Image (tube, coloured by chain):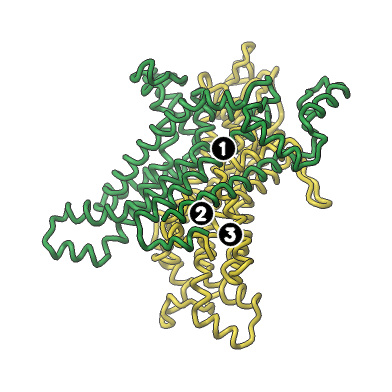
Chain colours: A green, B yellow
Amino acid sequence: MGRFIVRRLIGMVAVLFAVSVLTFLIFNVIPSSDPAQRMAGKAATPRLVASINEEWGFDDPLPQQYLTMMKKVFSGDLISYFGQEDVDERIVEGIPATFSLCLGAAVIWMFFGILFGYLSAIRSGGLLDRALTIVAVTGISMPVPVLAAFFLTYLTYKTEIFPSGGFVEFGESPLEWAEHLILPWVTLAILYVGFYSRVLRSNMLDAMDEDYVRTARAKGLSEHRVMTRHVLRNSLVPIVTLFGLDVGALLGGAIVVEGIFSLNGIGQYAFEALKNQDLPPIMAIVLFGAFFIVLFNTLVDIAYAFLDPRVKLGESAQ
Amino acid sequence: MASEPNEEVAPTAAGGPWLIAWRRLRRDWVALSALGLLVLIVAFCLAAPLWANEVAQSGPNDTHTLEKIEVGGEVREVVSPSGHPIGPQWLKANGKFFLGADGRLGRDEMVRLMYGGRTSLLIGFAAALIMTILGTVLGLLAGYYRGWTDTAIARTMDVIWAFPVTLLAIALGLSLAIGGLQIGPLHLSGDSIWIPILVIGFVFIPYMVRPIRGEILSLREKEFVEAAEAQGAGPMRVMFGELLPNLASTIIVFFTLNVANAMLLEALLSFLGVGVQPPNTSWGTMMSSGFDLLTSAPLLTLLPGTMILLTVLAVNVFGDGLRDALDPRSKVRLEAHSGLSAAETQEGIAP
């Protein structure tokens, strides 16, 4: 097990390296325009462009530029083109809001995803199942900005039930913290509620045909006990796997939600940087997001190896 | 098509697997109504030039900021002096500004909604086609050749997979929107709609390669492959003549899911300003520009947004029905894109 974890961690570092190179290439090789020209803005003089080139090392060979960039990312010296802010500092400042958003959304979607999936499966084919299927498929088909627009229009501007956005620290007032976050939470969670309830429903329906369920019934267990202790329990393992991966990738969805509800987290920083076409923060945030996805991938693999002895450690470690 | 080898269906079944699937689909009224809705939406978008020329007398990018229109004998400004656009006029102005104007520029919202839908649908279908074809071919190659081909493809997919899909699409979209794209003699400028199509088509490929590769790995052990090889069929013949037809139903179902996902990602990218670029309009860009006026004119966001929702919903529901009809036991479901299935995690990425 120890060797498996070490190999998995080495693999993680290798993938992260590849991701950082790819990110660097996306931002430094594909655009045919000159980054110095872009930084200098519309009123660029050749001298300004030359000095920016000098300072940022845009004339250096690419591998050298990559090293410079990575050094800046890790030493906290990365400065945005637009407004010359310290990128790492802004990212650290954004962590509480983004963390609150993602955590709350994850709790909501796990709760409702499992509840809806469970009810759908035990009432399979019935009216409740159909109603919940409609909810789930609508959730899966919902573009995030539309849901946010519906919420803001009908629950904020017309009826003033919820505030339109902003972030209140949990330490300041837990009640206001939740009140400000409830719309963003639901907006971010709805897609996953749909996915998870559908996955759980089909897993449970598959599990109901298994021999161990028949055995459990034959033993005389109550239907409720068969469903919760046997069917649901075994169907939850893939859900936990999915959960790890989706939480890791949540930053992507957080960008739109934070931008719309002005949550002032990492996502909103990315949202602003996109509007200004400001490359350094986007590069740093993409790396930050990729780090989490790779980390959660690794954690899920390791957790899986603990939970399911059938996983062959030697093979999946490659 | 009906004579293709398909081991799942008994040869005695009349008409072959495709006819059986069609009979099943014909009875599924939910899937058929979804298809009907989709056809209506496509027809609505195709009618764009007709409405623009005959009724609204305005193109999607024609501005009417300082113009006045006659509504039931009363003259009204398209954009008020404070910059507020006129609301929906329905048929009161002979179809002009049926859904109102889109903002300070006073463009006809109805015309833009129809033209925007063309862009959104085109991106959805073209990107889905790209990811389906590339995903299938890469999955076929990896699953058939195994060994180093598989390793190379799997590792590349792992790196793409390590990016959150939206972040990768945003990075690529931004970078290409600034600089355009140069592939050999072919140059795409930053505002070409082929840029979002290629970006969206590219980022979803890993989601398709893994399941296809998995199916090929098990299919290629079957006797019919051995039989074909014994008859002297080469790798191309086996891959495209023997293995591919067996994947047909999986690929068709995947295609519908891909369209739905591509349209959602287009909406998201355009909303963030890194998808479709002006002068082109899509439902995503309309939502984005409408959002600034959400307090005063929420319809400008809700209308294009609801169009996306309805289209994606129709595609998803129809795709689900198609899956039930083609292969009721199939594991490819709506959920396929949400991440790995447990089976894939267990299987690992090792050859």
Q: CA distance from mark 3 to mark 2?
A: 18 Å
| Residue at 35%, 60% in the rendered image | A309
Q: Which disc, if any, is residue B154? A: 3
To the question of a shared chain for discs 1 and 2, the answer is: no
Residue B268: which disc?
1
Give the residue type that dot 3 points to.
Ala
Please state the chain letter of the residue tagged with numbered disc 1 in the rendered image.
B
Q: Tell which tag, 1 or 2, sits nearer the viewer.
A: 2
Q: Amino acid at mark 1?
A: Leu
Residue A136 coordinates in the image, percent (x, y) = 38, 45
Q: Quadrant of the C terminus of chain B?
A: bottom right
Q: Chain of mark 2?
A: A
Residue located beneath label 2 in the image: A7
Q: Residue at x 54, y 38 (%)?
A: A289
Residue at 73% of width from left, 42% of height from top?
B192
Q: Position of residue B239 (x, y in %)?
A: 61, 73
Q: Quadrant of the N terminus of chain B?
A: bottom right
The residue most toward the front is A2
Badge 1 element: helix
